[in-house]
Amino acid sequence: MPRLLAVITARGGSKGLPGKNIRPFLGIPLIAHTILLSKMCPEIDRCIVSTDSAEIANVAKQFGADVPFMRPADLARDDTPIWPVLRHAQAKVEEGGSLKYDELLLLDPTSPAREPSDITGALNRLRESQAADGIIGVSRPDFNPIWHCVTEREGWMAHLIEEGGRFERRQDVPAVYRINGALYIWRTAFARAEPYSWLQKGKHLIYELPESRAMSIDTVDQFEKAEILVKSGLITFPWLKQSQTR
C-alpha cells in the first residue's frame, strides 16, 4: 500500500486570533482535535506537526504528536505560503534515510470538523485515478455565486459572473464548490517536482464534504460559532465520543 505522511501545520504567530492553535476548544487545545483525528486514521503511516512555536510543540506532544523538528523562521512569516512549508516537512522527514512516502496529507488544525471517513474516501478516490496529482476537500456554499453575486458596472447592477445572466432558474445553474481547508492530499512525486505552488500546476480531484462541516477558525466569532455547532450536536467529533466511552 502507498505510504502516507500527514502534516499538521501550526504557526505560532496568528494575528486574527492569537494563540488559536492551543486555545481551549471543547475542553482541549484546538490542535489536539486534529492530532486525535489522525490517530483514528489507519491509512496514516506517520503524522507530524510542523511549528515554529515551542509552546505549540509542547502542547502537541502532550497529546501524543510527533514533532521531529522546529520550523525555521523564514517559513513562519505572516505571508509564507503553505506549499514550501509542506515541502520542507516532507524533505526533513525523508532526509538521511531510505524511507520515502508516496502521499502527503495536509491537516489544518483550524478546520477540525473532518472525520476519519473523509480521509478514507479522499484517499480511495485519489488512488483510483493514476492521472491525478492530488485531491482537495471542498463543499458547496450556501449560495451559488454564479446565480446570486452581482457587482456595479458604470453605475448599474450587473452579474459578477456574466454567465449567470443566461439562467432563468436556480436549479439550472452549475454547482459551485469552495476549497474549505478540511483536507488536501498530494502524491509526493508531485510535491517534490513542483517547487512553487500546487494550485497553478497539476491535476486535482475534488472531495466534497457537507458545508456544515466546512468550518475554518481564524477569528473569535468563528471559534465561538464552531463550539456552538458541536455542543448542539449539529456536528459530531468522533474522537471525543471515543474518549468519553473509555
Image: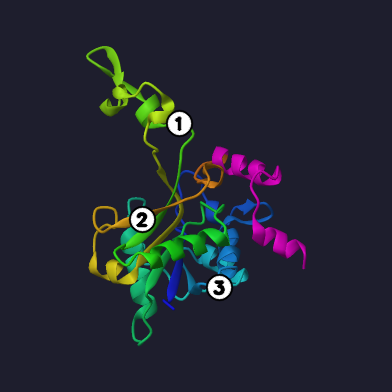
Residue located at (64% from left, 47% from top): 235
Give the alpha-carbon distance from disc 1 to disc 2, as whole Å. 22 Å
Whether residue 19 is visible to the viewer of this picture, yes or no, is no
* SS for callout 1: loop
Which of these two is toward me, 87 or 237?
A: 237
Where on the picture, by quarter, is residue 156?
top left
Which of these two is toward me, 220 or 231?
A: 231
Q: Amino acid at mark 3?
A: Pro
**Which residue position is annotated with label 3?**
42
* SS for callout 2: strand
**Which residue position is annotated with label 1?**
143
Residue 245 on the magenta segment? yes
* Disc assigned to residue 205: 2
User: Does 37 sit above or below residue 25?
Assistant: below
User: Are there few (<14), some (14-19), or many (20+) residues within 10 Å of tag 3?
Assistant: few
User: Are there few (<14), some (14-19), or many (20+) residues within 10 Å of tag 1?
Assistant: few
Which residue range is magenta in the image?
A: 221-246
Q: Amino acid at mark 1?
A: Phe
Question: Residue 11: image x %, image y %?
Answer: 44, 58
Q: Say whether disc 3 or disc 1 marks the residue closer to the N-terminus.
A: 3
Residue located at (36% from left, 51% from top): 78
Give the alpha-carbon distance from disc 3 to disc 2, as whole Å. 22 Å
User: Does 151 sit above or below residue 231?
Assistant: above
Q: Amino acid at mark 2?
A: Leu
User: Are there few (<14), some (14-19), or many (20+) residues within 10 Å of tag 2?
Assistant: some
Question: Residue 68: image x %, image y %?
Answer: 46, 76
